[in-house]
Image (tube, grey):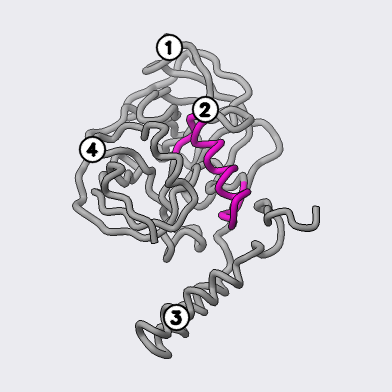
Amino acid sequence: MKNAPPFFIGWAADPPGSGRRVLLRAGLALAAGGAAGLAAVLARGNAELGATRWEGEARSLRGLLVAAPYPALRTRDLGGTVRTVFLASEGKSAAAFPAALVGQAIVATGSLIARGEHAMLAVAQLDAARGLDDTGLQAPAPVDEGEVLMAGEILDAKCWFGAMRPGFGKTHKACAALCARGGLPLAFCRSDACGAGLEAPLFVDATGSPHAPAILPWVADPVVVRGRLVRVGDVVQLRAGLQQIRRL
């Protein structure tokens, strides 16, 4: 289609529209901070996106199944330290599992999606595990790290972890909204860190719960969020209500 909006995947070349965004940011930087600001923006715009991977072969991870705020596996099977691996379906929705497995040791089999220390498993099968020592796998108490003001985009975590790369335009927004509607975790993609593969906090409401569908109009648009950073083990959350979001 000649006029189709740009769309691309994680292993493709540079994202369509990236040049336009760089020029826009460059213009704003030049107006606000002169040549130094312009140089900094252009340097960021030309930086490569952080490495991602989506393994084609199925692997099994053992750990403790938690349901909140999103389905996840607390496991030592990725490097020996306790890691949180979010669980998704093989499509654009959260993983389904029997309620009786929550808080229990399980074996999750599927394909691993990862960017840096962030990981998600596209689940093909979940089974109860026997003989697993779950000491230390329970999620620790949340630690409030203070108020922050962040600029960036609200994205679905599956795409950001490695299924896709942050894109541009209506198709990008529609894809992110569809994943969010399907119950996949949301991540806040900071404008100064997301593309480099640095930490993208899990985006939840002010109570630490998943956002209601009212969040959908805000997904995949440039926004500023005033919220609180809260650390739960190896996961950093950005907690903010809808009233704490404004468009750029």
Which residue position is annotated with label 2? 94
Residue 143 location in percent, x, y?
Answer: 21, 42
Precedes in sequence: disc 3 or disc 1: 3
- Helix, strand or loop at label 1? It is helix
Q: Amino acid at mark 2?
A: Ala
Instruction: Give the residues drawn in magenta, as a range.
Output: 164-185
Which residue position is annotated with label 4? 142
Which residue position is annotated with label 1? 99
On the image, which quarter does residue 30 sit in?
bottom left
- Please identify, in this view, whether the residue under mark 3 or under mark 4 is nearer the observer: 3
Which residue position is annotated with label 3? 40
| Residue at the (37%, 31%) spot, across then down | 212
Magenta stretch: includes residue 181? yes
Precedes in sequence: disc 3 or disc 4: 3
| Residue at the (50%, 16%) spot, across then down | 97
Q: Residues within 10 Å of mark 4 (few under 14, many from 20)?
A: some
Magenta stretch: includes residue 182? yes
- Helix, strand or loop at label 3? It is helix
